[in-house]
């Protein structure tokens, strides 16, 4: 399918040179071979040996969407070898990553091989403890390497944890000699979860990660797992054809809500109900309730937090809230970044006396994980990505850290560009009836491939009902979601519209005034 000129301009403006390759349907052959992922071959050999020798295998995941789905992928492929691994997802109170008490539990249970997913690359001490206790380790992770564990490691910053787990599962099946139809069935299943996690974990949706995500999103339309189907039904505008907006703002928050307010095992149980529709419905209902609670908590805490931030806000924010549930710290940090346009770290009390735990979010162009490395003396633990970090530190160090961190960011003069990025100008008369189909070829939208934002000139607010606005340009009109409380019917101005698949979001209404 050809693209209309506005969408061609989007891709050209983003430096996409081979537009035909970018929009053509992906193939499984476009995914990387096992030899291209560091450590893949050796790790697969070790797991195949464990299966052959009937060793006891455990999987250690994480409490977020990526860690939950990565663990489910590994459990799924191992079950294909008639192996029932012990799957352990840590409670948020245990802190991020592999921990010593969990390692001791694995040892007591007689575990021979431990596979970590979405964590473990920096768990040097914990992996060494496991090895001393007779538990071998395979690490599947994508986080920035700081203190690399001495283990067989499948590591790449290009994919999320579940994405690497999906590639690991495919390689394991192929190396074991599974028949083509069986491998294809596995590919279909694991890519669905990898697609959700890739969008949720904000890894750049470019190159091979984009390929894997597109393949998985296509397969979601024919998901067989009852739990996944029910989750899509509840979360998506069109469950039969979910887009990246559905995954980012519908599916992922519900999975994450379990780890934020309860236990990530609640999310994992959704996918355990592979063929039980009643159990699937009950599990998804619980996630939906937790997600509603999460929304209410974030709204209440963010409203209170905003009253404490001076105007104008400093170059960086380090905020400690004694009453804040640690599970929503990252969400509050993200909302602060959106509102105040500065790197933000939100801290909450830890169960460990004298310590706080926190999450940070960054602005475009500022590598938060790299910046925090020079403040490691303040932290008991920290790690993450360029745009998101987690940390644990003594409460007594907050003030000193906040001062030094703010001074660093202030010196960089990042600026606070409040202008919304525009991809070009759009005239509704030239869009055509196939615009939605063409827009879908640019999916998935997210980190590294944001949804297009177009400028529409001289539009009139035709109708305004609740959060929905219909704008008119000549004989043509467009409906969008809008939270701009200043809009009134009859206004005319230029405006910005963000196109997120099936949703249109009115981002900004410029220079609004009454129609002459």
Image (tube, rainbow, N blue to C red):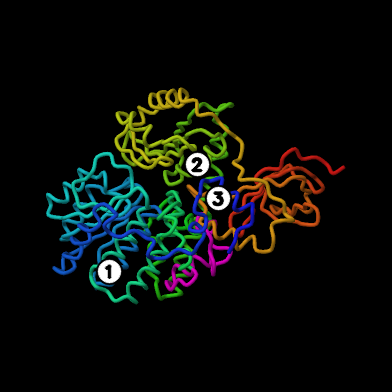
- Label 3: which residue? 11
Tell me the magenta residue range. 221-248
Q: Secondary structure at mark 2?
A: helix
Q: Secondary structure at mark 3?
A: helix
Place residue 178 in its image quadrant: bottom left
Q: Is residue 499 above or below residue 311?
A: below
- Label 2: which residue? 334
- The residue positioned 79% from the left and 44% from the top of the image is 492
Q: Position of residue 434 (x, y in %)?
A: 65, 63
> Would residue 231 appear left or right of 474 to someone viewing this image?
left
- The residue positioned 40% from the left and 64% from the top of the image is 191
Q: CA distance from mark 2 to mark 1?
A: 39 Å
Q: CA distance from mark 3 to mark 1?
A: 37 Å
Q: Is residue 396 above or below residue 49?
A: above
Asked if residue 227 is among those painted magenta in the image, a careful observer would answer yes
Q: Position of residue 200 (x, y in %)?
A: 45, 53
Q: Position of residue 414 (x, y in %)?
A: 50, 29
Place residue 46 in its image quadrant: bottom left
Q: Secondary structure at mark 1?
A: helix
Q: Position of residue 458 (x, y in %)?
A: 77, 45
The 10 Å Cα crowd at callout 3, few under 14, some 14 to 19, many 20 or more, is some
Q: Nearer the viewer, residue 232 or 451?
A: 451
Earlier in the chain: of badge 3 and badge 1, it is 3
- Label 1: which residue? 173
Earlier in the chain: of badge 2 and badge 3, it is 3
> Would residue 506 appear left or right of 378 to someone viewing this image?
right
The 10 Å Cα crowd at callout 2, few under 14, some 14 to 19, many 20 or more, is many
Q: CA distance from mark 2 to mark 3?
A: 27 Å
- The residue positioned 34% from the left and 42% from the top of the image is 351
């Amino acid at each position: 399918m050809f693209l209309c000129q506005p969408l061609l301009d989007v891709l050209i403006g983003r430096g996409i040179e081979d537009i035909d390759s970018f929009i053509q349907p992906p193939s499984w052959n476009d995914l990387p071979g096992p030899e291209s992922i560091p450590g893949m071959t050796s790790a697969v050999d070790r797991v195949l040996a464990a299966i052959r020798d009937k060793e006891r295998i455990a999987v250690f995941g994480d409490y977020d969407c990526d860690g939950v789905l990565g663990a489910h992928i590994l459990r799924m492929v191992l079950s294909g070898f008639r192996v029932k691994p012990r799957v352990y997802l840590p409670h948020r109170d245990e802190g991020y990553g592999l921990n010593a008490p969990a390692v001791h539990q694995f040892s007591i249970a007689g575990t021979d091989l431990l596979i970590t997913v979405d964590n473990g690359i920096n768990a040097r001490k914990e992996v060494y403890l496991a090895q001393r206790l007779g538990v071998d380790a395979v690490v599947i992770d994508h986080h920035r390497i700081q203190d690399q564990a001495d283990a067989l490691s499948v590591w790449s910053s290009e994919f999320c944890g579940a994405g690497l787990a999906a590639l690991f599962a495919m390689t394991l099946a192929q190396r074991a000699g599974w028949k083509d139809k069986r491998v294809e069935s596995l590919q279909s299943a694991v890519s669905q979860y990898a697609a959700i996690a890739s969008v949720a974990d904000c890894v750049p949706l470019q190159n091979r990660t984009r390929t894997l995500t597109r393949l998985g999103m296509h397969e979601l339309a024919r998901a067989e797992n009852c739990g996944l189907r029910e989750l899509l039904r509840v979360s998506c505008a069109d469950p039969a054809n979910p887009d990246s907006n559905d995954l980012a703002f519908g599916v992922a928050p519900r999975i994450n809500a379990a780890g934020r307010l309860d236990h990530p095992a609640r999310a994992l149980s959704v996918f355990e109900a592979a063929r039980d529709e009643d159990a699937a419905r009950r599990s998804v209902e619980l996630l939906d309730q937790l997600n509603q609670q999460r929304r209410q908590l974030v709204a209440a805490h963010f409203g209170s937090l905003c009253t404490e931030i001076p105007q104008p806000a400093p170059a960086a924010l380090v905020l400690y809230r004694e009453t804040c549930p640690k599970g929503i710290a990252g969400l509050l940090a993200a909302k602060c970044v959106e509102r105040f346009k500065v790197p933000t770290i939100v801290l909450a009390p830890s169960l460990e006396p004298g310590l706080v735990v926190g999450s940070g979010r960054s602005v475009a162009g500022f590598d938060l994980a790299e910046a925090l490395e020079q403040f490691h003396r303040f932290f008991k633990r920290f790690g993450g990505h360029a745009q998101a970090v987690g940390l644990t530190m003594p409460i007594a160090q907050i003030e000193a850290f906040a001062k030094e961190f703010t001074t660093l960011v202030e010196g960089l003069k990042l600026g606070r560009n409040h202008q919304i990025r525009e991809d070009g100008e759009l005239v509704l008369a030239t869009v055509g009836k196939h615009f939605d189909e063409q827009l879908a070829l640019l999916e998935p939208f997210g980190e590294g491939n944001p949804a297009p934002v177009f400028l529409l000139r001289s539009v009139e607010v035709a109708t305004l009902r609740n959060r929905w606005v219909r704008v008119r340009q000549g004989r043509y009109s467009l409906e969008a979601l809008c939270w701009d409380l200043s809009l009134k019917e009859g206004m005319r101005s230029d405006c910005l519209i963000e196109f997120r698949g099936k949703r249109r979001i009115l981002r900004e209404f410029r220079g609004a005034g009454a129609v002459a």
